[in-house]
Image: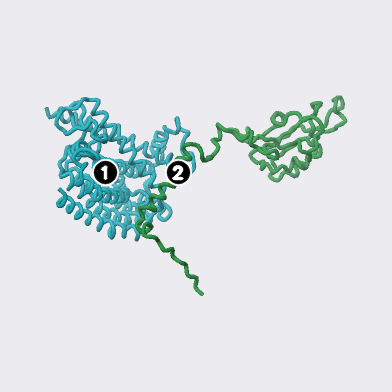
Chain colours: A green, B cyan
Amino acid sequence: MALVVRRPQLKWWEKIYLPVIAKGLVITMRHFIRTLTGRTKVTMQYPEEKWNDQLPEHYRGAPALVTDEQDRERCVACQLCEFICPPRAITIIPEEIPSEDKWAKVEKRPRAFNIDMIRCIYCGLCEEVCPEQAIFLRKDYAITGESRAEMVHDKARLYEIGGRRVGLVNKWNDLK
Amino acid sequence: MDFIALAISAVKIVGLVFLVIMPMVAYAVWAERRVSALIQDRVGPNRVGFQGLLQPVADGLKFILKEDFTPKNVRTGYYWLAPALTMVPALLTCAVLPFGSQLFGEPMVIANLNAGPLFIFAIASLSVYGIVLAGWASNSKYPFLGGVRSTSQMISYEISLGLSIIPVLMILGDLNLGRMVQDQSVNGWLMLPLWGDRFSLKGLLLLVPVVISFVVFTVSMFAETNRLPFDLPECETELVAGYHTEYSSMKFALFFLGEYAAMIIGSGLAVTLFFGGWSLPFGWLSWDGKADLPWWQGLIHMATFFGKVVVFILFFIWVRWSLPRFRFDQLMRLGLVFFFEIAVINIILTAGIMMLVK
């Protein structure tokens, strides 16, 4: 059975067409005035207004390394994050901690820890896999640079972003 | 003596075209983008300069710096001629528009022709050749379709455009645009006959045909300038960009600017014919063309004219972002079946009112 599409029965003022145009013009004028007087919410004006205070707690921004309350680097260069990183953005060169060092019993630390921020997909697997709770995804989102080399975050930069993480850090608790 | 007259004309041409019309075209584009954005709940370009006011400069620079690419298979001569043929008629028509009353004893019109509206229609009908040539010379199917559509559209709407102003000419009894404005300045605008001679039974009765002819004129003007809801020659959803698909850089910009210049001249003509050109409402600072005017009054008249034109351009933009595009058969039906007949009946109606009501 064929489907009969009912055409709407137009009233006489709809057939003249001009009143309907006027109606449409009123609608667009209403939008115009509402936007002009700022009653309609429009796009965030990005460089002037920032996301910072509107980011959710679970936001996954740039990954960064943290130190503990005694300023020891938490990373023990186990390389689990390097292996799990899906785009292979992390490169770690481990080194042994010399025996005269205060933290010699930790045995290992990264000599170089590079994260290629061009590759990073902000998936957070590195944070999830880290047994030492040394790498966290912070809220930094505007990672820019003028060259590829600049976009590779080395160890110093990663600690600069990460900073110090004190107290009992349990990565499954609310305090991230 | 002749030299002085020529120099004054040259100053008027340069002043009007390069200091007024061209910046108005540039800022019409800016206004188009900002107003459309506000209508669609967006912000629009607001980065270059305060509130994006330098955006036209950036756009112009971009057009100049872009590669001027001529495709291999085009008819080069016609292809190069077409953009000029859209831009030049649009600017030529501003010669007869009275953009002010009088400044330092000089009438503020470039050419004080006794056949103003006829001149405008004669020249404006040339601009169809720009689009047609662009369509044919591009040697590509989309420009071709755009050119074909444009031809039939512009030719059919020229009929109703020409017929729609005949009631105006009958009421004012003159073909000189300057004197038409002077008449309206003293005796009341055609669309607002609330003072002078027109504030009478006859004048108010004549408002009916004047409003009809204003509607027909405005809609035909939209069609003539290829503005939405009649932008079928461009029609980006069907024809890529219509007749200027194959154009780039400054040649494309000429089409673009020509469209906006035509829009400004069309607004100027509508303002001149129906809203009393440079005159203020209710006979304030009216001028019958006899005595000399002080310079400040001339400046006020010029400002009034351009203010009215700006309002009309904003109306153009407002309509563009409110209405969807017509289907082609609807467009032709509207032009040839409705507007043509309405315009003809309107002439008879005007003649009847003028004959019967004293």
Q: Out of B171 and B143, give the one closest to the viewer.
A: B171
Q: Position of residue B321 (x, y in %)?
A: 41, 47
For the point 28% across and 33% down, which residue is it?
B304
Q: Position of residue A156 (x, y in %)?
A: 71, 29
Question: Mark 2 falls on what kind of element?
Answer: helix
Above or below, B133 relative to B95: below
Protein chain holding label 2: A
Badge 1 crowding class, 10 Å Cα cut-off, few under 14, some 14 to 19, many 20 or more, is many
For the point 72% across and 31% down, which residue is it?
A162
Badge 2 crowding class, 10 Å Cα cut-off, few under 14, some 14 to 19, many 20 or more, is few
Q: Position of residue B110 (x, y in %)?
A: 20, 35
Question: Mark 1 falls on what kind of element?
Answer: loop
Q: Are marks 1 and 2 in contact (CB under 8 Å)?
A: no
Do discs 1 and 2 belong to a common subunit? Answer: no
How far, Cα to Cα, is label 1 from label 2? 26 Å
The residue carrying mark 2 is A30
Residue that lies at the very extreme toward the bottom in this rendered image: A1
> What's under tag 2, amino acid-wise?
Arg
For the point 61% across and 35% down, which residue is it?
A51
Q: Out of B331 and B281, give the one closest to the viewer.
A: B281
Q: Out of B161 and A132, give the one closest to the viewer.
A: B161
Look at the image and tell me whether residue B286 can be seen: yes
The residue carrying mark 1 is B191
For the image, the number of numbered tags is 2
Residue that lies at the very extreme toward the front in this rendered image: B201
Above or below, B222 relative to B333: above
Residue B10 is labelled as: none
Q: Position of residue A68 (x, y in %)?
A: 80, 29
The C terminus of chain A appears in which quarter of the rendering? top right
Look at the image and tell me whether residue B88 can be seen: no
> What's under tag 1, amino acid-wise?
Met
Protein chain holding label 1: B
